[in-house]
Amino acid sequence: MEKKRNKVRNKTRLAVSITVLLILIAAGAYGGFKIYLESIVAPYDAASAGYVNVVIPSGASTNRVGEILEDYHLIRNASQFKLIARLEGFDGKLQAGEFTLTQAMTVREILTTLSSGNANTKRFTIPEGYTIAKTADKLENDGFIERNRFLDVAENGEFLHKFMSYLPEGANRLEGFLFPETYDVFTTATEEDIIDRMLAQFDKEFGDEYYVRADELGFSLYEIVTIASMIEAEARAAIDRPLIASVIYNRLSIGMPLQLDATVQYALGETKERLLIKDTLIESPYNTYLITGLPPGPICSPGADSIRASLYPEDTNYIFYVLKPDGSGEHNFATNINDFNKFKRQYLNSL
């Protein structure tokens, strides 16, 4: 009996000893692993005081981000960077953008910065109805581009978007297609980058449904954007856009000149509150007082509402419109010359 107790006691002691040994080994391994982790998250150069601007492209994997950082000598090893990202919950959370980093940052600090979304970006807004020239002026004044370079890229740059095959060659080929919107771009964005971003937004706005609808109306994409640009330039109140669209289509259908002031102003290269008779006699393919049909192309960049109005006009018999005298920006619409002249007198008497 005593021998049996001793045997059990010895087995227990052995088990305890093995357990203690395994704990010590595990603790040592954990300690070693912890030391290893701390070594790979350490700064590339803790004494460095310089800054590095790094661009992380959209859709970059954690491994790709690590490779970029390694190339810039901000981390020592991309694989180790990926390991830390996984262990600490950053994998799949790194943002695209331009970031300012230093070699003195730890890997954890870099991961926190890249996952914060606080990229080095600048914001600009292009209002609806801007021409390419006016867009270039604003972007140059705001410090984003060099105007002549921007215009050269607009005329000659290569851009891969679905609608580009519909556009003509020439200086005005992108008129109407630099979509008016608020954009955040990297501080290092070039003229090409900015134009491509604006074209991509147009591509997004002008979806497959719109291509189908344009075919139903019997107009090309370029003609639709031309009509949308005239709606944008003529409309002052949102409610009028589909009605102005109906007037344009009604005049086109009966072969009547569009006689839109906005197209003459585009031909003149300036915006006037009121056109003079001599202005409407200017020789230009954009002067819709003298030509029938559409002008050669868009006269400004239309917004989403004007594009939609060009595709889905109101069903009316209107062929005239005149600003209301109440200052609302809305128009009175007419189906005949007598009503048009009445509305016109009301407006002129209010000036």
Image (spheres, grey):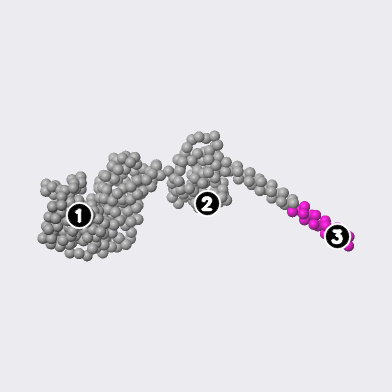
Q: Amino acid at mark 3?
A: Arg
Q: In this view of the protein, can residue 323 be seen by the observer?
A: no
Sooner in the amino-acid sequence: mark 3 or mark 2: 3
Secondary structure category for the residue under label 3: helix
Dividing the picture into quarters, in which one does residue 188 lie? Answer: top left
- Local crowd size for mark 2, using a 10 Å CA cut-off: few (<14), some (14–19), many (≥20): some
| Range of residues picked out in magenta | 1-19
Which of the two marks, 1 or 2, is nearer to us in this view? 1
The residue beneath circle 2 is 91
Amino acid at the residue labelled 1:
Asp
Is residue 351 visible from the viewing direction of this image?
Answer: yes
Gap in Å between the C-alphas at discs 3 and 2? 55 Å
- Disc 3 packing (10 Å; few <14; some 14–19; many ≥20): few
- Residue 69 lies, in percent from the top left, at 50, 43
Query: Mark 1 = which residue?
Result: 326
For disc 1, the neighbor class at 10 Å (few under 14, some 14 to 19, many from 20) is: few
Is residue 58 in the magenta section? no
- Badge number at residue 290: none
Which residue carries the number 3 mark? 5
